[in-house]
Amino acid sequence: MALAPSERGGPLTGITVIDLTRVLAGPYCTLMLAELGARVIKVEEPGVGDISRSIGPFLNGKSAYFISLNRDKESIALNLKLDADRAIFEQLLDQADVLVENFRPGTMEKLGYGWETLHKRWPALIFAAASGFGQTGPYAKRPAYDMVVQGMGGVMSLTGHPGGPPTRVGSSIGDLAAGMFAAAGINASLFERSRTGRGVMVDIGMLDAQVALLENAIVRYTATGNVPGPLGARHPSIAPFAAFTSKDGHIIVACGTNKAFLDLADALGTPELGRDPRFDTPTIRVENVDQLQIVLDDLFATRTTAEWLVILEARGLPCGPINDVAQVMADPQVAARNMIVHTEDPVAGHVQMGGNPIKISGHPDGTLRRHAPNLDENREALLAELAMQAG
Amino acid sequence: MALAPSERGGPLTGITVIDLTRVLAGPYCTLMLAELGARVIKVEEPGVGDISRSIGPFLNGKSAYFISLNRDKESIALNLKLDADRAIFEQLLDQADVLVENFRPGTMEKLGYGWETLHKRWPALIFAAASGFGQTGPYAKRPAYDMVVQGMGGVMSLTGHPGGPPTRVGSSIGDLAAGMFAAAGINASLFERSRTGRGVMVDIGMLDAQVALLENAIVRYTATGNVPGPLGARHPSIAPFAAFTSKDGHIIVACGTNKAFLDLADALGTPELGRDPRFDTPTIRVENVDQLQIVLDDLFATRTTAEWLVILEARGLPCGPINDVAQVMADPQVAARNMIVHTEDPVAGHVQMGGNPIKISGHPDGTLRRHAPNLDENREALLAELAMQAG
């Protein structure tokens, strides 16, 4: 708490996070904390550092992937098995509000920094642990990566096309969701600590996070007995709510109300669809969703995606294109919301990355971020700060 | 703040949330707040209520979908266009810490409850708005649903198989991610308010949330110039990290290190793969990922998924099955973590739902939840509480 605050403002200004995390779930959590204004100090293994430093693509030898997850953080390399380095680590904890790690359960205990030990010595410290399966239960000690929990947690059984091959969610939602829940739990615990003065342990399992995101699939199964399967590009219980084939690609249209469907039928030049007994109620449209898809695909095939978007947007119908990453980055709304940010890295140069989706009044939301640290880059400055605290 | 706390304990005990949200992004946010101990009071449109009340599946006429998102909340029906009901709403705000809505931008202003107005009258109130595109930018006033932002935000361009049809992420990540970021932002703002005494506005756009989840796709594009496409069931930059075909289904194996690949080659009875020049470094395995897939599919085809899991788990290799929702619900780890919770609903009976993935020491993590309210169910009790506050 007594270290200098981060240069970025935010609701967590003045909060210091000691970050033992590697690769993705943990670093994504601490990235969210940094975006909210916390000062994040990575403690990395000497010589190697966060494993994501070795994952491409590289720019002048520095991982752009690492940069995107670790901008606006600091780095010190410490070997937590050596007494001298442990002393520095403990001095950092003396000044810290939050400690985050995503080791396999048991690792912190082996290092002598299990929750009981930490809480006794630093009673106000919030300790967050993100792991594959959480700290308890029969799988607690097993390793996990994103795809393992995507498979075990059910989302892959819902993603893809009926009868088709297994399909992974295209971004690492197994890791990212765990990081997001960890950040939400840490923030709630900072609030609680403002009332109690005491820290808590936040225990996040990647598999738990996947179960929490199954949404309607659990009640669809438990209320009906039918095991939900993959549905391609449509919603399980609303129609039309799908991707359709246009003259030059695809268009997504989502009619959440009956009125929206009538408007769509009108926009397509086929108002009679709204009175067609196969399609005239929300329930029957879901029953006849395959026929509806054929009818709408034929209608949408007569114009380009861009042409249809103009027509449907004029009527206020929820619709959109399927953008690739280049198109996302060129989208004027994405730019207007500062959702592409950049850093000027002394090694890698100009790097663009996803921005902060949590916009809060009174706090800056610029597009420039401090560069991601080289391994051990902030050692001297941190040691000097700690010496000032001690003296 | 002066209303009675929720019966559930948690870091947000004593916090009162007034909830104007409908369907998914907003209700998922306030569900997270309820799981963290906040008291959540839904203010619903008389006669209709939250639209999700009309989305199936139904149990004795009550939506199981609504129940799963709104357990542990209360309900009062108010018409915010009528003076008498506005007076009640304002009495609720007098007692509230947080107001959450997910209307289209401009709706709150039309009701006379825009942020400026709210902040002037209730300076300590935190106001969170989740919308399709956020409160600013050229698309701000457009409607959006989950699939629209899944398409526009890029994740659909990464999900599915090369050359295959468009593929939606099987759970509504467009909504759920916005709800998660909103909850994280609200929690951070509660912490900030503990220091400043002042509320802020949290502005969440569903499209922003999708961009924030693109992860490595942005740097893969900006650092290399190659637009990332769908990759089926494998990781873009690590191999093997994919689903493989076993004798009776599929198995997911994720080798995050070179040592893990050597262990896998050994477990498969083909240690020579580790020295095969096509596969002997992490980089070259990614280059030759199609050949690696064929080789490993052939090897995995010799045993069942269950047999392979025993062999690979014994070596500590990250691996798992592709579970459907029934298998997820039967998983002993999911049970041990209390990730399936239930409510005993007076109308719908026993309903099972996903649990709370944010486990925090010192707070209960049981599996029973209070039932989701019928429309206006808590009117009398709430009015009595407000009368006591006033008197």
Image (cartoon, coloured by chain):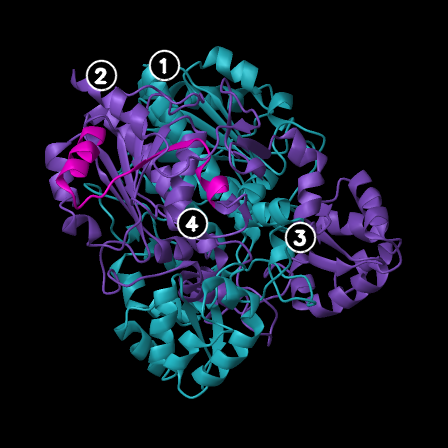
Chain colours: A purple, B cyan
Q: Which residue is depicted at the point 65% across and 48% down?
A: A325
Inspect the magenta stretch and tell me whether residue B131 lies in it. no
Residue denoted by label 3: B226
Kindly check if marks 1 and 3 are in contact, taking CB atoms under 8 A apart as contact.
Answer: no
- Asked whether the residues under marks 1 and 4 belong to the same chain, the reply is no
Disc 4 to disc 3, C-alpha distance: 20 Å
Residue A280, visible in the rendered structure: no
Which is more N-terminal, label 4 or label 2?
4
Disc 1 to disc 4, C-alpha distance: 38 Å
Query: What range of the chain is rendered magenta?
Result: A66-92
Q: Which residue is depicted at the point 38% across and 77% down?
A: B265
Which amino acid lies under the numbered mark 3 shown in the image of this protein? Asn
> Residue B155 vs residue B246: left or right?
right
- Asked whether the residues under marks 2 and 1 belong to the same chain, the reply is no
Which amino acid lies under the numbered mark 4 shown in the image of this protein? Ser
Of residues B120 and B152, the one nearer the viewer is: B152
